[in-house]
Image: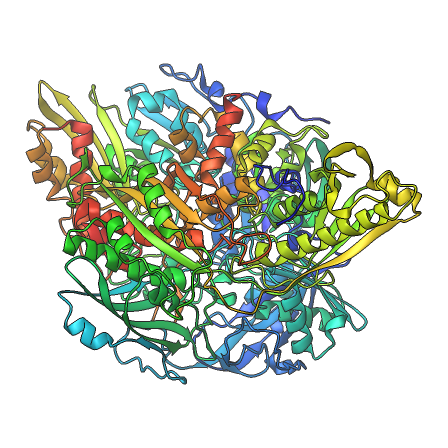
């Protein structure tokens, strides 16, 4: 199964193009983030633990119980994979620890740095805050899936051309975020790029060149 | 200087590891796929001072997948031998010994480690470990009243001339206390270690700026021969100094792997990085200046206090700039550290020098304002002709050229010296500048160079590349020295089994490693030339070796390019599989020159006149750093340092709740580093030149100096914009409302 | 993170059923997953509601706008109707978090967002919100970012949302659905001030689900906008913020909707400021005079005294930006 190249997918705003009119609904026309397909597709191994409190104290026997797991089918870089995951596993840890895709980085594990940015159903998200169990049926694109064989994605090439990185640790996230930024159309000016790329921290301080790389790619410079 | 044509050196080439980095293939420590690896998570102390009275591990142990748990209760055997090679460790005090006793020295100290089959299980089990303490009231505030200056060592002092008398008789006198808060490096890559034992041999994948240093420290801690330890670190995701020492978590990972008998991966959480790997210490820097009406600084009295831990006495080069940036005849300095219940500080980009520069360069701006002298002119008037500390001539010192070049390029003449005189809507606009100095470090380095029969070369050194581009710049040097194209030279680093390199810090990598590589490549090329000229079958037979150059892998007579042959032909004919040499660099020990790099940073800020927000408009850095090997990468380093300086000046502040020693912003949402939207277009200019007194390749080091004057330049711009002199960093809205 | 079981609701009934059984709803998850990792949140069951049909934005019969609870922040910000009718909403959204987080987080989740108070997030610190009765470490701790309005001795935590400030200003209402049916709660009543029960943050009944936020029809033309003041230019919570909407006709302010963020335990409606504005002609003098009331009743803490003045100036500035100068 292959996925559409990110640069040719529908832009998010198109989903709403007819949406705004008196009384009409403007439901998204495309699937985003969470798959809405199969009914009951997630297997809940542990079953529902009942109880009135949602802030439950640890159950007395929790220590000896195996943690609940689920089976998830997710398409990663065009390849459909079915895995059984601990419900607590983030998409980031699934990619890194289970699938050998270590290009996505864990910089903060709290959605505050952007190093883990990937595309889920075409949209840039923080994979560290995305529970893998929720991704049944989703399509994930990581930095490893961006190039076509030996041919780099134009933004990857632009990062090299502009020297838009130093240590390289944030680079995967920057590039995935940049792909999202371009797709969203937030590249009208350097200021707009700066703002819409601010979810990706570069501690080496390559921002000026990151903006140039996104500009180069968005405007075919 | 090499007799070889310089094609790669000085050319604006892209990074040789760029493709690996943009495709996610570059392997940082936690990315290595080690067969059978299990996960370790550290449990940290939640009190800052006291004793551990109990560790309840029952809930953690019962978690499925948990393989083991280690704390001081297990009395793990660790030798903690002296490590004389750890010259970067504080000279006084003793490194933290993990799990050796029940004493808690700071909040966040590792008190146990949990190992489990999966990361989720290890994290959860660590959460379930219940540690009880007999806690005491900690002391974590350097400036709290009543904090005793119970420094076990006397303060460091420096004096020249008669500073008190000179100050008393000075026409212009200024006094200020400058405060710099604690900063954390916050490199994007968290520190991580993967440790694997194969019998007596320990292999460690580690985030480090010094593979051989980590090797020696692990050998000392585990009481084993350094030959049995290998440290691998091919990519470092930023470090800025906190990968120079070998921190407790590296020991913990190796210890856990030994106990569990499986390879163990340990990655610090972002929060743990605030307690586990050092930081730039907070400073109080009192400065009194005496000057003539004409702006000649006659006296400078520096009183410097900095925080350190209770168990190690960390000091850094904070005294140097006050001694040598300006020709001040009368100087007194006292520098003391305040031991607190905190973890030990460490080097952070421009360590000491940049903290001093904030005080000194802010004070110079105050003096310029006081005397009505332009800040650039003021600095020109205080330019020393020789190093005032020892009377040595400068190897090269082009600070005045930096000042003049920068003033022109930045449009300094448009600055109105009267504060608060330029407005743009709600924004007050101001310009400021500051100078900087950083010493040129050089240390013994070695490199291995091998030319294979296929005409490609492999160069190896144990150094690191935390982002400056060591891979690329060393390849550029090697390519030119060997007469090869960039494509046919591969440089490998980040392995302690490679020839020894000094710490990848202090801006000394190019000087040391670069010079050693150059030496090795020169030797190899000369060996090949010798082989050719002595080989009767070679077209170069009998030619004077000095008349031969190598280009594109082909040796030929300099004046007659047609006469020559390739390395491949030469080696094949002589049935040589390869040629190999070892390059070395030993810095000259004669100390005939004072060697330093210099900077001038210019900043233009906008300050919202009502809301007190400071936003950068423009920045320019001008540098005298000797020869630039890799201009494209050097540019990035300077721009990045300016971004770091924006953080230090306006955003970064490790905030501690002194009631219990807890850092309250130990994450990247609350500890603010600059984001893309904070950074305007910024520029860097490197003066063309070289310093061959420093090293054979003429470099003076640039990673540190580019950071040194950034924060004071911004603070001075804020003064020019608002008329407010803010002496505390970071400068936030409350200071400007 | 504590173990939990997971179920995905395919329709609202199923969700409510699971919610009634003690399941915790998860939508974007950007707050919940983060807090679960810190073990601040320890749900035993997560009920994934993202497949529910709550992703519409529609114009109501009365001319207001109804934003489904599961509409992503980025979708709402980009929506033409939102941009045209309520710029203050789209601005507040676009000044929140990061592009990635806005692609994940939902409108319903945003108003359920929990505080960034560092002591709340640190399970080893005293916090009445997290652990009733344990005390408030922030009251005398490091409290630069904490609230100055709506605080109690038990809690001084700031509500972190930006768009909720715009909702408060515009007097939105929250549509809820529970086992007993649907109901609508005025936004002002939806988020609760801490009082002596800071652990109670919303007027939600157990198992109740947010289905939409509705913005009332307002007289047109309506000028509106959001100003966010923060140390960093982007990707940071507000030190102070102001949501302002003004209906000016024949040179007179007929309607004024003003609220502040970053300063209150809940988004802070500035009725005193609104009163100063209505019936008067826009002028710099009026903005200054009205904004003087922005911090009425403020109770600053050791490190956030500056917010009192900063809040007034933030409101003054935003009144001028929206209402015009001179």
Coloring basis for residues: rainbow
Q: How many marks?
A: 0
Q: On the rendered structure, is B239 left or right of B221?
A: left
Residue drawn 59% across and 60% down? Answer: B209
- The correct choice, above or below, for B437 with respect to C321 in the image is below
Residue drawn 45% across and 19% down? Answer: A16
Q: On the rendered structure, is A36 left or right of B530?
A: left
- The correct choice, above or below, for A167 with respect to B364 in the image is above
Locate residue C150, reporting x and y percent.
22, 52
Q: Quadrant of residue C121?
A: bottom left
Q: Quadrant of residue B73?
A: bottom right
Camera-side residue of B379 and B495: B379
- The correct choice, above or below, for A85 with respect to B181 in the image is above
Residue drawn 47% across and 64% down? Answer: B593
Camera-side residue of A123 and C105: A123
Q: On the rendered structure, is A59 left or right of B639?
A: right
Q: Does residue C188 appear in the picture of this structure?
A: yes
Camera-side residue of B68 and C5: B68
Q: Does residue A52 appear in the picture of this structure?
A: no
- The correct choice, above or below, for B141 with respect to A215 in the image is below
Locate residue C80, reporting x and y percent.
37, 20
Locate residue C308, reporting x and y percent.
17, 51
Camera-side residue of C222 and B210: B210
Locate residue A26, reporting x and y percent.
44, 20
């Amino acid at each position: 199964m292959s996925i559409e190249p990110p640069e040719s997918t529908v832009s998010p705003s198109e989903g709403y193009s007819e949406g705004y009119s008196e009384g009409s609904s403007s439901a998204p026309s495309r699937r985003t983030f969470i798959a809405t397909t199969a009914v009951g597709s997630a297997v809940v191994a542990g079953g529902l633990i009942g109880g009135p409190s949602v802030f439950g104290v640890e159950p007395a026997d929790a220590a000896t119980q195996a943690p609940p797991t689920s089976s998830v089918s997710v398409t990663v870089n065009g390849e459909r994979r079915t895995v059984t995951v601990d419900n607590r596993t983030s998409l980031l840890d699934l990619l890194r620890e289970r699938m050998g895709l270590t290009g996505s980085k864990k910089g903060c594990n709290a959605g505050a740095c952007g190093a883990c940015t990937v595309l889920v159903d075409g949209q840039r998200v923080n994979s560290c805050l995305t529970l893998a169990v929720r991704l049944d049926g989703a399509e994930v694109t990581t930095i490893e899936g961006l190039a076509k064989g030996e041919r780099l994605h134009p933004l990857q090439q632009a990062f090299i051309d502009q020297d838009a990185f130093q240590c390289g640790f944030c680079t995967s996230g920057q590039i995935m975020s940049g792909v999202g930024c371009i797709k969203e159309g937030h590249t009208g000016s350097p200021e707009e790029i700066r703002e819409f790329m601010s979810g990706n921290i570069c501690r080496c301080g390559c921002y000026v060149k990151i903006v140039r790389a996104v500009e180069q790619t968005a405007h075919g410079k | 200087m090499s007799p070889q044509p310089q094609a790669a050196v000085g050319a604006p080439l892209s990074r040789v590891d760029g493709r690996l980095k943009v495709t996610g293939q570059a392997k940082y420590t936690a990315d290595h796929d080690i067969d059978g690896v299990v996960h370790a998570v550290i449990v940290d102390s939640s009190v800052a001072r006291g004793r551990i009275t109990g560790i309840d591990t029952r809930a953690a142990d019962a978690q499925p997948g948990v393989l083991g748990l280690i704390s001081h209760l297990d009395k793990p055997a660790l030798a903690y031998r002296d490590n004389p090679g750890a010259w970067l460790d504080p000279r006084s005090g003793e490194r933290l010994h993990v799990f050796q006793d029940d004493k808690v020295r700071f909040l966040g100290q590792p008190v146990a480690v949990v190992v489990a089959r999966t990361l989720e299980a290890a994290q959860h089990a660590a959460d379930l470990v219940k540690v009880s303490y007999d806690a005491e009231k900690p002391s974590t505030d350097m400036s709290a009243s009543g904090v005793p200056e119970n420094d076990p060592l006397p303060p460091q002092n420096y004096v020249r001339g008669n500073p008190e008398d000179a100050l008393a008789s000075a026409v212009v006198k200024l006094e200020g206390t400058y405060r710099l808060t604690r900063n954390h490096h916050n490199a994007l890559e968290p520190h991580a270690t993967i440790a694997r034992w194969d019998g007596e041999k320990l292999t460690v994948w580690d985030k480090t700026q010094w593979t051989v240093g980590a090797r020696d420290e692990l050998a000392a801690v585990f009481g084993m021969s350094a030959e049995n330890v290998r440290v691998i670190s091919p990519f470092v995701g930023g470090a800025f100094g906190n990968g120079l020492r070998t921190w407790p978590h590296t020991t913990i990972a190796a210890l856990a792997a030994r106990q569990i008998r499986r390879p163990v991966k340990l990655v610090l959480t972002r929060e743990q990085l605030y307690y586990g790997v050092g930081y730039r210490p907070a400073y109080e820097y009192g400065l009194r200046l005496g000057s003539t009406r004409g702006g000649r600084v006659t006296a400078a009295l520096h009183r410097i206090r900095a925080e350190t831990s209770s168990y190690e006495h960390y000091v850094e080069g904070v005294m140097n700039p006050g001694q040598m940036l300006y020709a001040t005849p009368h100087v007194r300095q006292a520098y003391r550290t305040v031991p607190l219940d905190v973890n030990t500080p460490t080097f952070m980009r421009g360590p000491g020098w940049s903290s001093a520069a904030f005080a000194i360069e802010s004070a110079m701006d105050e003096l310029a304002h006081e005397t009505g002298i332009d800040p650039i002119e003021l600095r020109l008037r205080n330019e020393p002709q020789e190093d005032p500390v020892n009377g040595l001539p400068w190897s090269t010192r082009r600070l005045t050229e930096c000042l003049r070049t920068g003033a022109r390029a930045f449009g300094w003449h448009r600055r109105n010296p009267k504060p608060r005189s330029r407005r743009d809507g709600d924004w007050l606009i101001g310009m400021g500048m500051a100078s900087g100095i950083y010493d040129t470090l050089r240390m013994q380095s070695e490199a291995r160079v091998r030319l294979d029969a296929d005409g490609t070369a492999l160069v190896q050194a144990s150094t690191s590349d935390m982002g400056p581009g060591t891979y690329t710049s060393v390849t550029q040097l090697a390519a030119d020295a060997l007469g090869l194209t960039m494509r046919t030279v591969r440089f490998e680093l980040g392995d302690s089994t490679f020839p020894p390199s000094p710490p990848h810090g202090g801006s000394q990598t190019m000087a040391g490693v670069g010079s050693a590589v150059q030496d090795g490549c020169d030797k190899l090329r000369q060996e090949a030339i010798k082989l050719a000229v002595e080989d009767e079958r070679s077209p170069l037979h009998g030619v004077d070796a000095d008349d031969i150059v190598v280009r594109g892998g082909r040796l030929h007579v300099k004046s007659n390019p047609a006469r020559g042959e390739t390395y491949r032909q030469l080696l094949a004919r002589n049935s040589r599989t390869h040629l190999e040499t070892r390059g070395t660099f030993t810095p000259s020990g004669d100390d005939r020159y004072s060697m330093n790099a210099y900077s001038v940073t210019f900043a233009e800020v906008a300050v919202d006149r009502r809301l007190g927000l400071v936003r950068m408009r423009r920045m320019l850095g001008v540098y005298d750093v000797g020869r630039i090997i890799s201009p494209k990468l050097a540019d990035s380093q300077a721009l990045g340092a300016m971004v770091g300086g924006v953080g230090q000046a306006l955003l970064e502040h490790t905030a501690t709740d002194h009631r219990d020693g807890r850092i309250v912003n130990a994450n990247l949402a609350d500890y603010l580093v600059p984001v893309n939207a904070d950074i305007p277009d910024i520029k860097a200019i490197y003066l063309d030149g070289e310093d061959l007194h420093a090293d054979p390749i003429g470099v003076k080091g640039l990673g540190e100096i580019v950071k040194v004057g950034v924060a004071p330049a911004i603070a001075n711009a804020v003064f020019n914009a608002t008329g407010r002199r803010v002496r505390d960093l970071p400068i936030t809205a409350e200071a400007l409302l | 993170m504590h173990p939990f079981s997971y179920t995905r609701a395919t329709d609202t009934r199923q969700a409510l059923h699971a919610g009634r059984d003690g399941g915790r709803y998860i939508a974007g998850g950007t707050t919940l997953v983060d807090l679960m990792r810190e073990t601040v949140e320890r749900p035993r069951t997560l009920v994934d509601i993202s497949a529910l049909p709550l992703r519409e934005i529609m114009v109501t019969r009365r001319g207001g706008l109804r934003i489904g609870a599961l509409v992503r922040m980025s979708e709402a910000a980009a929506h033409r109707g939102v941009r045209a009718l309520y710029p203050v909403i789209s601005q507040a959204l676009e000044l929140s978090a990061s592009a990635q987080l806005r692609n994940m987080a939902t409108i319903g989740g945003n108003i359920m967002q929990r505080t960034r108070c560092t002591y709340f997030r640190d399970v080893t610190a005293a916090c009445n919100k997290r652990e009733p009765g344990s005390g408030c470490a922030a009251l005398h701790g490091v409290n630069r970012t904490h609230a100055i309005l709506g605080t109690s001795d038990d809690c001084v935590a700031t509500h972190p949302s930006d768009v909720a400030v715009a909702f408060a200003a515009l007097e939105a209402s929250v549509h809820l659905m529970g086992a007993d049916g649907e109901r609508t709660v005025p936004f002002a009543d939806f988020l609760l001030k801490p009082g002596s029960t800071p652990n109670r943050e919303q007027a939600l009944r157990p198992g109740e689900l947010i289905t939409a936020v509705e913005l009332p029809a307002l007289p047109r033309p309506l000028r509106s906008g959001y100003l966010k003041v923060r140390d960093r230019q982007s990707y940071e919570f507000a030190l102070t913020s102001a949501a302002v909407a003004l209906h000016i006709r024949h040179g007179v302010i007929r309607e004024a909707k003003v609220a502040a963020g970053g300063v209150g335990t809940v988004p802070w409606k500035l009725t005193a400021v609104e009163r100063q504005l209505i019936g008067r002609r826009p002028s710099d003098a009026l903005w200054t005079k009205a904004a003087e009331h922005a911090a009425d009743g403020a109770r600053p803490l050791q490190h956030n005294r500056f917010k009192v003045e900063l809040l007034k100036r933030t409101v003054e500035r935003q009144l001028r930006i929206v209402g015009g100068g001179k």
